[in-house]
């Protein structure tokens, strides 16, 4: 087992144990203060779930659900940006994960419609 494999295995057991974890209920990165997932967290998640993109989507869907709950509790007026929240949590892996680019023709058409 190489050092990298061991590191990936450790990440997996920590469940998205990225070096840039979200700080709830604000959903900002604990490390760099960017809205989570920040760039570093996205890279770590892509690496961690490279073999199981479906699990990445399930994990992020759970995060999105929690984040909407948390942020709504903090400030009910931000719920109008649900589309932004969706893209923040679930839009980016659809653009980065080949397995999903094939099957999600809707993501491309949605982007066209909103831009
Ligand atoms: Zn970060």
Image: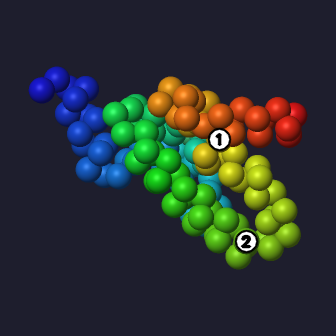
Residue that numbered label 1 is attached to = 91
Q: Is residue 4 above or below residue 76?
A: above
Disc nearest the viewer among 1 and 2: 1
Question: How many neighbours does mark 2 have within 10 angstroms: few (below 14), some (14-19), or many (20 or more)?
Answer: some
* Relative to 82, 16 lies left or right: left
Assign the N terminus to one quadrant of the image: top left
Q: Is residue 18 above or below residue 101?
A: below
Find ligand 1 in the image and state its quadrant: top right
Query: Mark 2 CB in 8 Å range of ligand 1?
Result: no
> Residue placed at 69% from the left, 45% from the top?
87
> Residue placed at 70% from the left, 76% from the top?
73
Task: Indicate the position of residue 31 as horizontal and vertical percent values.
Answer: 53, 44
Q: What colour-coding does the image apply? A: rainbow
Does residue 78 show up?
A: yes
Residue that numbered label 2 is attached to = 72
Report how many numbered discs are placed on residues in the image. 2
Q: Are marks 1 and 2 in contact (CB under 8 Å)?
A: no
Does residue 34 show up?
A: no
Q: Nearer the viewer, residue 29 or 37?
A: 37
Cα gap from disc 1 to disc 2, whole angstroms: 20 Å
Q: Earlier in the sequence, mark 1 or mark 2?
A: 2
Circle 1: element type: helix
Dividing the picture into quadrants, the one containing residue 108 is top right
> Residue placed at 25% from the left, 26% from the top?
4
> Residue placed at 47% from the left, 53% from the top?
58
Task: Indicate the position of residue 96 as horizontal and vertical percent values.
Answer: 56, 28
Circle 2: element type: helix
Task: Indicate the position of residue 69 as horizontal and vertical percent values.
Answer: 65, 71
Q: Residue furthest left?
A: 1
Q: Nearer the viewer, residue 113 or 89?
A: 113
Assign the C terminus to one quadrant of the image: top right
């Amino acid at each position: 087992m190489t050092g990298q494999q061991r590191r990936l295995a450790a990440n997996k057991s920590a469940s998205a144990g990225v070096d840039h974890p979200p700080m709830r209920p604000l959903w900002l990165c604990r490390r760099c203060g960017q809205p989570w997932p920040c760039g570093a967290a996205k890279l770590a998640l892509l690496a961690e779930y490279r073999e199981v993109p479906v699990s990445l989507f399930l994990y992020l869907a759970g995060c999105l659900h929690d984040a909407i709950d948390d942020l709504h509790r903090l400030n009910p007026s931000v719920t109008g940006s649900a589309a932004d929240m969706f893209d923040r949590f679930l839009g980016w892996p659809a653009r980065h994960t080949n397995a999903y680019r094939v099957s999600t023709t809707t993501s491309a058409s949605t982007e066209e419609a909103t831009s």
